[in-house]
Image: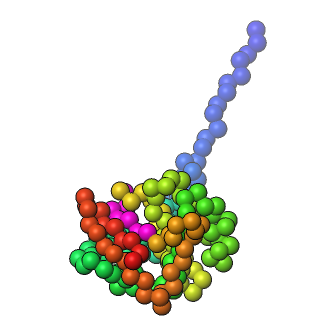
Amino acid sequence: MLEKEKIVPEEVDSSRLLGFRLFNVGGRMKADKSDRQAGKRKNILTVIGFILLLLLLLYFFVDNPVLLKNKLNFKQAVQNINTDKITLQEITPFEWDKVYTFQPYFPKQKMEEIMGLKSTVISETVNEGMTQLVFVNNGKIVCCINGYSDNLGYYISFLEEGNEYSVINYENNAEFLVSNEQDKVSLVLE
């Protein structure tokens, strides 16, 4: 008759799985202090790495925090206008030297050529009913607005008939006529 060989599972030191060694000291199990500190450091670095990754993802997929802040502050300033005429200098809560607007469907590559910069935040409008403004200061975009005026809560127009784009320089002091209808503020170049 053949004897069956007993298979005994290997013992696994569970303390190794937890990242530190246990020692039997006076009948009590104690962890090695250096292994615990290394485990804490590893956990802290993992949390820091996760936070940095999250911030990076927010930056690229949501919006640059400075641009987002400027966009929200601009919206609030426009919605608080209580006059019949105003200049963009009076309502912009950030520094700028040029503001551009482009006709619908205008290619992003051409926008970048006209403004003399590359950007991940600008995009072409996909409909005639959209507002698009790109504020630039010292060759950098400081505010980019691209959306339907009903969603934005305001409409701003200074694109001259027949032009592909228009630009207003800060020193021009371009004056806009203001109207407020159905909870939407409209600014049209005078």
- Quadrant placement of the N terminus: top right
Q: Is residue 19 above or below residue 142?
A: above
Question: Which residue extends farthest front?
Answer: 161
Can residue 17 be seen by looking at this rendering? Answer: yes
Question: Which residue extends farthest right?
Answer: 2
Residue at figure coordinates x 57%, y 87% from the top left: 138
In the rendering, at what x and y percent does residue 141 appear? 54, 77
- Quadrant placement of the C terminus: bottom left
Residue 47 appears left or right of 93: right
> Is residue 155 rendered magenta in the image?
yes
Residue at figure coordinates x 63%, y 69% from the top left: 111
Q: Nearer the viewer, residue 43 or 21?
A: 43
Question: Which residue extends farthest bottom?
Answer: 171
Give the image's coloring scheme.
rainbow
Can residue 53 be seen by looking at this rendering? Answer: no
Residue at figure coordinates x 46%, y 58% from the top left: 130
Residue 156 appears left or right of 3: left
Q: Nearer the viewer, residue 5 or 185?
A: 185
Q: Is residue 88 above or below residue 171?
A: above
Residue at figure coordinates x 37%, y 74% from the top left: 74
Residue 12 appears left or right of 171: right
Q: Is residue 119 above or below residue 9?
A: below
Q: State the count of labels.
A: 0
Q: Quadrant of residue 20?
A: bottom right
Residue 173 appears left or right of 42: left
In the rendering, at what x and y percent does residue 164 appear? 59, 66
Give the magenta-colored segment's residue range: 151-157
